Amino acid sequence: MNYPTQWWVAGALALVVPCVSAAKPIAFANGTTLMAEYGAGTMKELQLFYAPRYFYSAGLGHLALRSDVDGRSRDITYARLNYLLKRWNREAAQANVFVWGGAGNARLGEGPGDHFAWNAGFQTDYETRRIYGSFKSELHESDAFSHRIDTLQLGLAPYEHDYETVATWFVVQGRRYTGNIFDGTEWALLLRLFKGGKWLDAGVTADGKLQAMFMINF
Amino acid sequence: MFKPAFWIGLLLSAVAAAHAGTIEMKVNGLVCAFCAQGIEKTLRKNPATADVFVSLENKLVAIETKAGLDIDDAQLKKDLVASGYAVKSIERTQTPLATIRERLKKPRR
């Protein structure tokens, strides 16, 4: 839980520096979001959210963590509520602050039984059509574990996409885990493509592992 | 009896009323196609909407309304706000949506 100062500085910069297009937990009013992420073998997550209004969504998720340090595992299934706390719409930019919380069940690889688990987090992002940045932090807690996952993304688009064209972004991602899941910062370089409600991130980590995410809004 | 000018005027009025109108809205926060699809989805639900065009480059959302129908400004603002965006201006024109689409489309740089 002792994060280097540079990490916090980078997170703060994500708030104020024009940054890539951020995956958001709320798509649009009456919209459904399905998201699947493969995080370098360390984490896998599947989420399904429905948004009755543009500022909140609710749904289910499953998070599987596999420790890169000692091999321990957590399988957390949860229900979650996402809320758009604040949005700034500017002429050529948008910024958001999302918060969420949920609860569910966790199974541990190293011991028997189910554990009640809760989660909470926030995400802040800023984007123009050329630069993007986001910082996300989420906490997963139970009587048997405490894991926080912090993810910073900074992106650059080689061209300004429009509504009917494919958006292309180059994204640098840094992710840190607490609770002995991964030692240090897991860096990844990603290619991001999206068009018409479909979104794909794919790349490699510094260890040469696959980092990928697919999302669809409908 | 009515003069020919009356009938011509009446005919022109009828043609104008039957012609589909175009509503052009400047919208703040339009930076991501993935996020803006909610606007199109919401506007297409309105029974007066014939077609919708979104240009991120021009921060523009344009609607072609069905012949003889309109969507009032209050409803447009309500729909855009309900989609999570801010309306900067609303203008009504007689430029067909296809013309706007062609004018604003340009090759990728």
Image (cartoon, coloured by chain):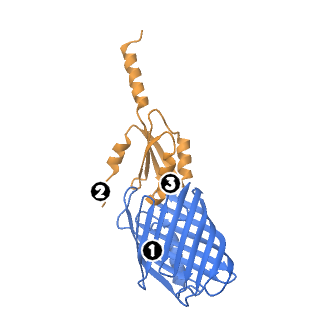
Chain colours: A blue, B orange
Q: Read off the residue under disc 1.
A: A212
Q: CA distance from mark 1 to mark 3?
A: 25 Å
Q: Amino acid at mark 1?
A: Ala
Q: Nearer the viewer, residue A72 or B99?
A: A72
- Counting residues from the start of the chain, the first of labels 2 and 3 encountered is 3
The answer to which of B35 and A33 lies nearer the viewer is: A33
Q: Is residue A35 left or right of residue B53?
A: right
Disc 2 element: loop
Q: Which corner quadrant of the image does residue A197 belong to?
A: bottom left
CB contact under 8 Å: marks 1 and 3: no
The disc numbered 2 marks a residue on which chain? B
Q: Residue furthest bottom?
A: A70
Q: Are marks 2 and 1 on the same chain?
A: no
Q: Position of residue B36 (x, y in %)?
A: 47, 56
Tell me the tag on residue B107. 2
Work out whether disc 1 and disc 3 sit on a shared chain.
Answer: no
| Residue that numbered label 3 is attached to | B38
